[in-house]
Image (cartoon, grey):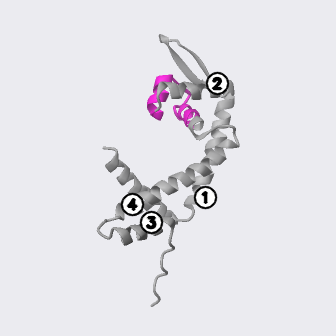
Amino acid sequence: MSASPEPRKDPVDAIIEQWAEVRPDLDTAAMEVFGRVYRLARAMGDRIDKAYARYGISRGEFDVLATLRRSGEPYTLSPRELSATLMLTTGGMTGRLDKLERAGLLRRSPDPHDRRGLQVTLTGEGLRLTDEAVGAGLAVQTEALSALDGERAEQLADLLRELLFATER
């Protein structure tokens, strides 16, 4: 019977080995997981940023457009609903909305049910661009995930969901 190949080493392994040398009393198991999660999120964020840049938008701007798209027809939410969904301050949201409105991807209009309120709606161009950009972002993610077979990818998703529930309490 042949032995399993030794797992490849990554930069997190080097960090763990260094800590083991200088602080052998530490249990670095959590660092092994979260160090990799952090590095993976950063690397994938960079790849997705490049995918969205081809459409002239940032990841944060995509998030606004995608939130409107996911809301279903008529693709309209209030700035407050957008801010709450995206966990942004109203100031941060205003800057994104300004840029997206100047680009013709959304429009702001008075809320017919609240004289003081506004509605934000995707334009036809915003809908088209969002649908193309979401496909490009998913292609990048799917390509990266292809390193795992379907069963292992599903298992990873389940484990990450469990961990996310535990940390968002």
Residue 38, image x and y in percent?
47, 54
The answer to the question of whether label 4 and label 3 lie on touching residues, with beta carbons closer than 8 A, is: yes
Q: Which residue was labeled with disc 1?
A: 143
Q: Which residue was labeled with disc 3?
A: 15
The answer to the question of whether label 3 and label 1 lie on touching residues, with beta carbons closer than 8 A, is: no
- Mark 3 or 1, nearer chain start: 3
Q: Residue furthest top?
A: 115
Mark 2: amino acid: Glu
Residue 30, image x and y in percent?
36, 60
The answer to the question of whether label 1 and label 2 lie on touching residues, with beta carbons closer than 8 A, is: no
| Cα gap from disc 1 to disc 2, whole angstroms | 32 Å
Q: Which residue was labeled with disc 4?
A: 31
- Mark 4 or 3, nearer chain start: 3
| Cα gap from disc 4 to disc 2, whole angstroms | 42 Å
Mark 4: amino acid: Met
* Element marked by disc 3: helix
Q: Quarter-wise, where is residue 32 in the image?
A: bottom left
* Bounds of the magenta segment: 63-87
Q: Is residue 57 left or right of residue 37?
A: right
- Of 113 and 59, which appears nearest the observer? 59
Q: Which residue was labeled with disc 2?
A: 101
Q: Residues within 10 Å of mark 4 (few under 14, many from 20)?
A: some
Q: Residues within 10 Å of mark 2 (few under 14, many from 20)?
A: some
Residue 149, image x and y in percent?
52, 66
